[in-house]
Amino acid sequence: MVRYKARYLLITIYYPTEPTPSSSNPTLPFTHPSHPSLTKQSLSNLIRDSLALQFGDYGAGAAGNMAVKYFSPATSTGIIKVSRAHYRMLWASLTFIKEVLGRGAVVTVVRVSGTIKKVQIEATRRAKEGIRRAQGVGGEGVGLDVMDVMGDDDDDEGGEGEESEGLVG
Amino acid sequence: MEAEMVGIPPQSKKLQKSSRSLQRITIKSPEYSYFHLKMIFDPPLDTAGLVDAITWRTTLTNSLMQYLGVVGSAIRIDILHTEGEEAVLRLPTVDMVKFGAAVSGFVGTSEGRSIGFKTLGSSAFLMGLIGRAREEDIWDGFGN
């Protein structure tokens, strides 16, 4: 039985065209919370549109078997699952995204892994790092509920004992 | 085209003089490949059908854009020669398969006509495209 191999991409959405709010953390430039209407479904539609535009019918079909496993509008961080054979095509179409819900945006892939567990670990590590830096600089807490990064679904984690490739952005 | 001398077997000194004029050259990975396409129309064009290079360019771009998107439409296609409803194109060998797929499955419309492509031949060498017209004659007599 041939196993279905996937890749999990940890992404962050930045909004570099917007002025940094005075209350935000100077050590985390360009980070803005996304609009609450940017849900997993709407982000998935955005990505599929980009895939169809950049890579046509072929791309939409090949990498279309993708799912947004997690997305938090507060931290603009998300996890996308895509088949291993076409993850670079999906990565490229993420790179080509210019705006999200009318705001100029940049989508960066922070980490790629074969298991969702490693990606989750990386996401919590980055969140903690952000808090640590914020507290170190300002002396005050960031005030964001960043520890609630892994609130929801933890599916298909059990059967995937695969190797992971580390790509730290 | 880059040519490499590959695996010329060692020759005995006796034969070397006479076989000096014979060389074996292997071209491993040609940079470009060539396509011979025909544009087909439904309903067909008038008997003196002529398709200019601009129509070729726009129709090819449309077919690539549909199947392969913006990235696919950036495939470098050179229109080497157009004649009647046929054209000879050159494109990078790495894009050959995808281009072939895009062109085969394309259906477009223009001025009330449906447009499609028929691949008359494809080859890594221009010479491989000529002399193929007779292949069509195989089907003469069937279904007539």
Image (cartoon, coloured by chain):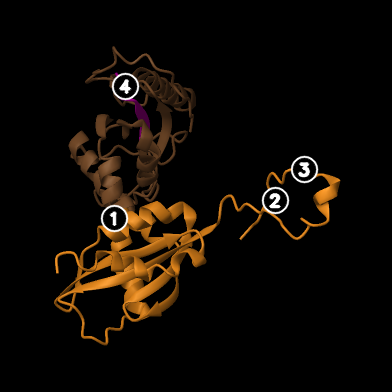
Chain colours: A brown, B orange
Whole-Å distance between the Cαs marked 3 and 4?
A: 47 Å
User: What amino acid is found at the position of numbered circle 4 in the picture?
Assistant: Val
Chain bearing tag 2 is B
**Is disc 2 placed on a helix, strand or loop?**
loop
Of the residues under marks 3 and 1, which one precedes in the sequence? Answer: 3
Out of A20 and A138, give the one closest to the viewer: A20
Question: Does the magenta segment cover residue A2?
Answer: yes
Residue at far right of view = B13
Relative placement, left or right, of A45 versus B18 is left
Residue B65 at least partly seen: no
Do marks 3 and 4 share a chain?
no
Q: Is residue B80 above or below residue A53?
A: below
> Mark 4 near mark 2, Cβ–Cβ under 8 Å?
no
Tags 3 and 1 touching, CB below 8 Å: no
Chain where mark 3 sits: B
Kindly identify the amino acid type of the residue bearing the numbered disc 3: Pro
Q: Name the residue under label 1.
A: B67
Furthest residue in direction bottom, as rendered: B48
Q: Where B58 falls versus B68 (above or below)? A: below
Magenta part of the chain: A1-12
Q: Mark 3 points at which residue?
A: B10
Task: Report which residue position mark 2 lands on.
Answer: B5
Q: Which mark is residue A2?
A: 4
Residue in the image at 47% along x and 52% along y: B94
Looking at the image, is mark 3 or mark 1 nearer the viewer?
A: 3
Amino acid type shown at disc 1: Tyr
Quadrant of the image for the N terminus of chain A?
A: top left
Mark earlier in primary sequence (1, 2): 2
Q: Position of residue B31 (x, y in %)?
A: 55, 57
Q: Which mark is first along the chain, 2 or 3?
A: 2
Whole-number angstrom distance, CA of label 4 to CA of label 2: 42 Å
